[in-house]
Amino acid sequence: MQAPASKRPAFSLVALWGVVGFLVILGQAIHRLLGLALEPIVRGQLHSWQWGLYGLSIALLGYSEGYRAFQLKAAPRIVVRAMHLARHPRPLHVVLAPFFSTGLFHATRRRLITSWSLYAGLILLILAVRQLDQPWRGIVDAGVVVGLTWGAVSIIIYYVRALAGHPPRVSPELPGEDAVGSSA
């Protein structure tokens, strides 16, 4: 069922910038990691039991990072925050829309702590995984690529649905909002 045109949010370059800007960041990470994830396959470095770990990495990180973290939590919030910014633009927020959309600033205290802690933890994990030799790095990176790709697709789907009049029903977690009941 299609929403009446009057209930659909107006297309906005601000919201598009918030969503696409973050997708570009994800795309760069996916592009950088894809070669490393495929390297042990291309070089024939995987023993049969390592193929199992490769598949397990894809399944576990696809589920935990792609589905649970992105599809259920981050993607809807990114879209809702980008749409909010389109309706309430502030010059600095617009310039930094991809970071606004991810909740790195102008958010509830809980969202700020969660977002900054998450990204700090991701940086530490990235640094740790960089120390691994192949095929181990490729095994981990394969799962990360699947999770990030799943996340990017989720964001696109939520954004298109929002433009069609079906925005995600999550809090944008803005300052002054009651953070009770919101999810990380």
Image: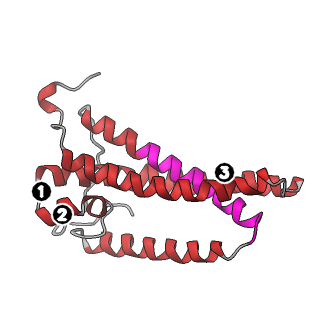
Q: Residue at x 64, y 55 (%)?
A: 35
- Crowd band around label 2 with a 10 angstrom C-alpha radius: few (<14), some (14–19), many (20+): some
Q: Secondary structure at mark 3?
A: helix
Q: Which residue is mark 1?
A: 89
Numbered disc in front, either 1 or 3: 1
Residues under labels 3 and 2: Cα distance? 36 Å
40 lies above or below 156: below
Q: Are marks 2 and 1 in contact (CB under 8 Å)?
A: yes
Q: Which residue is mark 3?
A: 59
The spot of residue 93 in percent (x, y) is 18, 63
Q: Are marks 3 and 2 in contact (CB under 8 Å)?
A: no
Magenta stretch, residue numbers: 133-154
The amino acid pointed to by label 2 is His
Residues under labels 2 and 1: Cα distance? 7 Å
Q: Is the N terminus in the top left, top right, bottom left or bottom right quadrant? A: top left
Numbered disc in front, either 3 or 2: 2
